[in-house]
């Protein structure tokens, strides 16, 4: 049940004809995992918090650095040196005290990933490397949890919503995994900002059961040319991740 | 010549190309997808794509993007996973 304060806070969402109080309550009763709270996770967590997602678990094992501040909009100079999850926790509750935020200071690894995703209805990708993304993809497939992939590099961004059992998984989409060559990818703040906005929209569509998610589709954006590529992606019948689960 | 191109973002289109080179394949693929895959001035493939001819990355071919294709050659254009966050 939404309080009067919550009804006022979310008024501009509630008046959207297809949304209403019923879907706002669904958001309140939802639990989202934000895996990585850097450039992508900063912005997706802000939008999900402000939209009223009732419970967010945020996971990261990094500390705020000066070079994060061009894009990781949860943090400010005064947070440099702090654990990201602690700064983010405080900041998100400051934005919306009607939600619950569970910070986990940890690197997502094989031995903890199942515990970390437990209870989440949607996992939002805010990671910065291939390895953890593919680990999370496989656990989401196994645990039947939708996974909203987002990735960025320089002026490029990509997003896809993976629904286990229905859509191709990340391993179907990307069969050739290139070597991670650079320690630090070039990035401007507006690209993760743009992709994370779309990721938060996808998460809300899934949680509130509204609209049509980017399921089975991959959206690629090239900021240098302003071009979008929306492609239909297909399951790989030999996928070692999702096909063995079916 | 008809060239079948394997991609992970646009199915496996069959492209009819008069002078089949990787360059012309990529131009036609860009034309069909309405998305630039390479810069025809600098000849650089955009970073989010990898291009292979018979399993060999185009940069390792002696003629690079101007490699001429023969019947039965296998061309693969792959969108790479963007890993940053």
Image (spheres, rainbow, N blue to C red):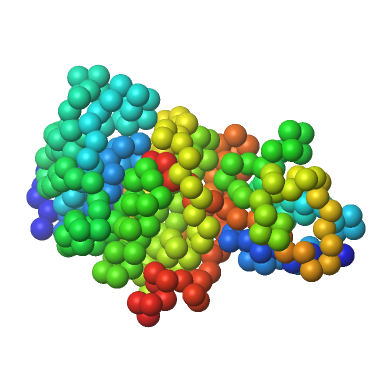
Q: Position of residue A6 (x, y in %)?
A: 14, 46
**Considering the image in quadrants, where does the C terminus of chain A appear?**
bottom left
Q: Position of residue A9 (x, y in %)?
A: 19, 42
| Residue sitting nearer the eye, A26 or A30 | A30
Which residue is outermost to the top? A77
Q: Position of residue A94 (x, y in %)?
A: 15, 33
Instruction: Decide if residue A133 is in sight here.
Output: yes
**Considering the image in quadrants, where does the N terminus of chain A appear?**
bottom left
Q: Residue at x 38, y 46 (%)?
A: A129
Residue A120 is drawn in which quadrant? Answer: bottom left
The answer to whether B38 is drawn above or below residue B7 in the figure is above
Q: Residue at x 57, y 53 (%)?
A: B79
| Residue sitting nearer the eye, A46 or B64 | B64
Residue A85 is drawn in which quadrant? Answer: top left
Instruction: Decide if residue A198 is in sight here.
Output: no
Q: Residue at x 80, y 45 (%)?
A: B63
In the image, taking residue A101 as reference, residue B75 lies left or right, namely right
Q: Residue at x 81, y 50 (%)?
A: B67
| Residue sitting nearer the eye, A222 or A140 | A140
Which residue is outermost to the right? B18
């Amino acid at each position: 049940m939404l309080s009067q304060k919550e009804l006022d806070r979310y008024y501009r969402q509630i008046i959207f004809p297809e949304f209403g109080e019923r879907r706002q309550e669904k958001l309140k009763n939802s639990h989202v995992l934000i895996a990585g709270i850097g450039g992508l996770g900063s912005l997706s967590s802000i939008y999900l918090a402000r939209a009223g997602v009732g419970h967010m678990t945020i996971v990261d094992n990094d500390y705020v650095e000066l070079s994060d501040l061009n894009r990781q909009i949860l943090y400010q100079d005064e947070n440099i040196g702090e654990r990201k999850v602690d700064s983010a926790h405080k900041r998100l509750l400051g934005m919306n005290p009607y939600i619950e935020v569970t910070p986990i200071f940890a690197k997502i690894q094989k031995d903890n990933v199942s515990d970390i995703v437990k209870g989440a209805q949607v996992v939002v990708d805010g990671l910065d490397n291939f390895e953890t993304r593919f680990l999370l993809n496989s656990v989401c497939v196994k645990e039947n949890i939708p996974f909203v992939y987002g990735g960025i590099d320089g002026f490029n961004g990509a997003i896809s919503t993976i629904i286990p059992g229905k859509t191709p998984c990340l391993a179907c989409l990307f069969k050739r995994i290139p070597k991670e060559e650079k320690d630090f990818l070039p990035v401007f703040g507006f690209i993760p900002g743009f992709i994370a906005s779309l990721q938060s929209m996808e998460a809300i569509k899934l949680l509130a059961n509204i609209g049509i998610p980017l399921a089975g589709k991959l959206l690629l954006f090239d900021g240098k040319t302003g071009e979008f590529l929306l492609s239909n992606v297909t399951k790989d019948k030999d996928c070692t991740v999702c096909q063995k689960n079916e | 010549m008809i060239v079948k191109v394997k991609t992970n973002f646009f199915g496996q289109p069959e492209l009819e190309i008069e002078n089949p080179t990787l360059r012309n394949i990529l131009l036609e693929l860009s034309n069909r997808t309405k998305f630039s895959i390479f810069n025809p001035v600098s000849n650089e493939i955009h970073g989010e794509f990898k291009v292979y001819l018979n399993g060999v990355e185009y940069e390792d071919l002696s003629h690079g993007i101007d490699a001429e294709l023969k019947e039965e050659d296998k061309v693969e254009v792959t969108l790479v996973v963007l890993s940053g966050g």
